[in-house]
Image: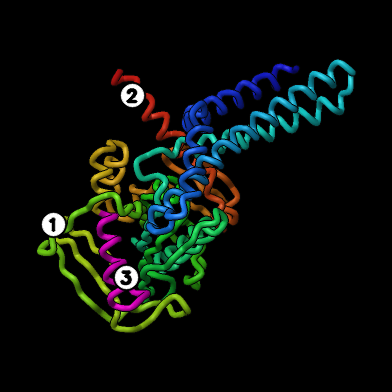
Amino acid sequence: MRAETQNIVAEIEKSLELLAQRMDYETAPHRLEEFNARVEDPNLWDDPENAQKLMRDRQLLVDAIETYESIKTDLNDNIELIELGEMEEDEEVVTDAEQAIKGLKSKAAKKELEALLDGEADGNDTFLEINSGAGGTESCDWASMLARMYVRWAEKKGYTVELQSETAGEEAGIKSAAYKISGHNAYGWLKSESGVHRLVRISPFDSAAKRHTSFCSVWVYPVVDDNIEIEVNPSDIRIDTYRSSGAGGQHVNTTDSAVRITHIPTGIVVTSSEKSQHQNRDIAMKALKSRLYQQELDRRNADINAAHEAKGDAGWGNQIRSYVLQPYQMVKDLRTNFETSDTKGVLDGDLDGFMAATLALNVAGKSRSEAQGD
């Protein structure tokens, strides 16, 4: 086996070790048997909420086992093909198997990163807020572009996207929007997107065709599970109803049912304008509890806390990522230096590379901190 292929095999084996460790592979079959026994309980669906959680946890374990065993089997099969091809001096068989192992490396690396999403709330659904910043109409248009980008990304992941509220820009785009994105690890992936996003382009709103710079802030926080207790003192909140305003379309209404809740001690403001007044109040309270829970997570995590404290205004000097469309094309993350010239792909939702790079950076930082603590 060639040295390059040996190195790739070693990397895949390391990924397999991590996958096995994360799911505790030795006990996984026994835990799956327990899940299966509980699923067969005729009284399971007497408590739909717990039943759904059980089914979800079981499926996660099934997926983890199948992923691990699939990668391991494919690796062993292709190693055997290489050995057989070398014995019979069949270069075509060797080359095909080596290519298959290279592809397997990418799959294993991706699954390894997903396995690292083991934070307290990483597996949760998430709220995502977009707010236009410096740049006026340009910024509002940029906010709508970001909203489209994240919706496209979520749809590619198979996640469910619900628009919670939206405020239209005066001339174009949106001033703000809030979404709930539901799916396994939605928060774990999207949490790296919190920060200020900077756009440089030739303005479609400038008759002189000059280059403009626009800013928007993106903030992400997890949907709080029902088993996480977050108490909100009624005297600490102010609830206002108002006539919502949006850009129009099926997602936006213009009734008086919109609800705004202000948490006075922290200044947190959440809104919902998509349902009835009663439903909007319920949605907004859940969003508020999630924001308060995010603050608690921030206090426990020094890296995330520092990022939020340093976020500043949506303007110069505070961006985490730059999207340059003119005079050249490039999207670059300023935290990881990950970049690509495929600006169209990024704006169409191809964000996994950026998220994975940030996740790997955070995991490396966490590992160093733990090593120093030891």
Report the number of discs. 3
* The label number, if any, that marks residue 294 in the structure image: none
Identify residue for label 3. Answer: 272
Say whether residue 8 is visible: yes
Residue positioned 29% across, 21% down in the render: 373
For this rendering, which residue is in front, 345 or 153? 153
Q: Earlier in the sequence, mark 2 or mark 3?
A: 3
Question: Which residue lies most toward the front here?
Answer: 42
| SS of the residue under disc 3 | strand
**Quarter of the figure that contains the N terminus:** top right
Does 54 lie within the magenta span? no
Q: Earlier in the sequence, mark 3 or mark 1?
A: 1
Say which quadrant the C terminus sits in: top left
In the image, is residue 29 above or below residue 257?
A: above
Quadrant in which residue 92 is drawn:
top right
* Residue 303 screen position, x and y as percent: 31, 37
The magenta region covers 272-291
Question: Which SS type dominates the magenta stretch?
Answer: helix
User: Where is residue 246 shown, x and y percent of the image?
Assistant: 39, 77
Q: Amino acid at mark 2?
A: Glu
* Position above or below: 191 against 182: above
- The secondary structure type at the circle numbered 2 is helix
Q: Position of residue 55 (x, y in %)?
A: 48, 50
Q: How many C-alpha atoms fall within 10 Å of the one at disc 3: few (<14), some, or many (≥20)?
A: many
The residue to which callout 1 is attached is 265
Residue 33 is left or right of residue 66, and the answer is left
Which residue corresponds to the image point at 36% horizontal and 76% vertical from the top-left?
Answer: 275
Q: Earlier in the sequence, mark 2 or mark 1?
A: 1
Q: Tell me residue 324's x, y (percent).
A: 51, 53
Give how far apart the Cα atoms at labels 2 and 3 are.
40 Å
Q: Residue at 40%, 44% (x, y): give it.
A: 122
Q: Which residue is mark 2?
A: 370
